Amino acid sequence: MQIITYILLGFFFLNIVFAVITVFREKRDIAATWAWLLVLILLPGIGFIFYLFIGKKMTREKIFDIKSQENIGMPELVQAQKEMLAEDENLLSAKQATENAKEMASLFLESDESILTKGNKVELFTDGAQKFNSLIEDISKAEHHIHMIYYIIHNDKIGKRVLKALEERAAAGVDVLVIYDALGSRSLKPNFFKTLKKLGGKAETFFGSKFPLINLRFNYRNHRKIVIIDGKIGYTGGFNVGDEYLGEYKKFGYWRDTHLKIQGNAVLALQSRFLMDWNAAVPKHKLEYEENFFPLIDKKGHTNVQVVSSGPDSDLEQIKKGYIKMISMAKESVFIQTPYFVPDDSVLESIQIAVMSGIDVKIMIPNKPDHPFIYRATMYYAEAMAAVGAEVYIYDNGFLHAKTVVVDGDICSIGTANFDIRSFKLNFEVNVFIYDAKIAQQQQNFFYEDMKKSYLLTKEIIDNKSKWMKFKQTFSRLFSPIL
């Protein structure tokens, strides 16, 4: 027994030593460092397996490879858009934007080189069937190219419908390129795209593995959802490709999400993002600038738009900064919808300050988890916000997956980024920041309609939770920096 005791003590001592060495040899923020130390020390041996899959940072070589794509074929687009903007004395005319919007536009120009585009037509979808019917109809009319990124593509009814539409256009000579995330679409077999490839289309995984069943890269996933058709029509938002997004999974029920269809020069920014992701993902078939990829489009509407990207290839956390800026500028209201509410301290404090300043802050989250551990952390932070005076609504009509922010009914953000650290730091995301009171108020009205299908998180509900549930929420919160 004494020998066994010494062996165990030695094992635990070595585990602590290796835990410290493992965590501190990579540069990361303090909160994530302590969270990983907690995992590695509390779960000897097993913790290192978790770290192998979700803790390892992206190599400098890979980051450099991704960042280097930004200069491939982009100067032509950037210069053309700058010339268009130079015609106006200000980024936004007085009729079309407040000072807040001008500050937001300047922030993204500096942090993300995100060019503001004017005269876009923007259409919002909150229902999966409507979104996919519109998308498939537009795909069927493509003449030159279809470029597509989805985090999740399933081999199910809607997946096959989308694939069939792509195959038909590829057979007609349209250039079809598809990126799907290797982890998000892990159930998808490569032969799903066999016919598409025979017809001349291409489909590539993002951060795939040489061993299909083993992918050590749980982090740094491409969570973007982008479709560009002929450089003239763009789609982005929360919907992936799968039957659950049509509300056909009993587990989730009705799927409430928000997606955008954009016509106008903002599509060129989505195109730029796609080309960078394609060139970062594929070992060959690299793309260069083509005029047909970036057709300058006549005015389609009246909406001013900036497409903003963020990801682990940059330390600037551009979308998070956009959220903080929006919240800090609010004079009347902040409405947030997100399936995962696990903010870092900077975002949390910006919301707290808004609430304590008398701003009407409303937050809406789902009533059920698709990832239980993350949902417990979400509930912890939701209750913390309710405690300081924010109104927290629990959507009770299925599953809420929308990622939206509306400030003062004047500016809104819709995209792929959740209100959590994973979206801010670990995933590749894209959001559309919209400077149009009409669209912002439309999104705010969606929020009010959703409130009718939600219930308010009250002090009574919080107090009546079991001690075991409160413990799970508090415990989950400890790991929020790495969730």
Image (cartoon, helix red, strand yellow):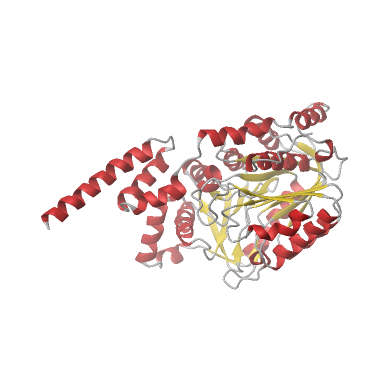
Q: Nearer the viewer, residue 407 or 358?
A: 407
Quadrant containing the N terminus in the rendered view: bottom left
Asked which quadrant contains residue 86, the reply is top right
Q: Residue 14, relative to residue 75: is it above or below?
A: below
Residue 310 horizontal/vertical position (percent): 60, 40
Residue 142, visible in the rendered structure: yes
Q: Nearer the viewer, residue 39 or 189?
A: 189
Residue projecting furthest to the front: 198
Residue projecting furthest to the left: 2
Asked which quadrant contains residue 474, the reply is bottom left
Residue in the image at 69% along x and 45% along y? 432
Residue 478 horizontal/vertical position (percent): 39, 51
Residue in the image at 60% along x and 73% along y? 250
Residue projecting furthest to the bottom: 250
Residue in the image at 41% along x and 59% along y? 473
Residue 110 horizontal/vertical position (percent): 64, 29
Residue 368 horizontal/vertical position (percent): 53, 66
Q: Residue 112, relative to residue 41: is it above or below?
A: above
- Count of numbered marks: 0
Q: Is residue 459 left or right of residue 340?
A: left
Residue 316, visible in the rendered structure: no
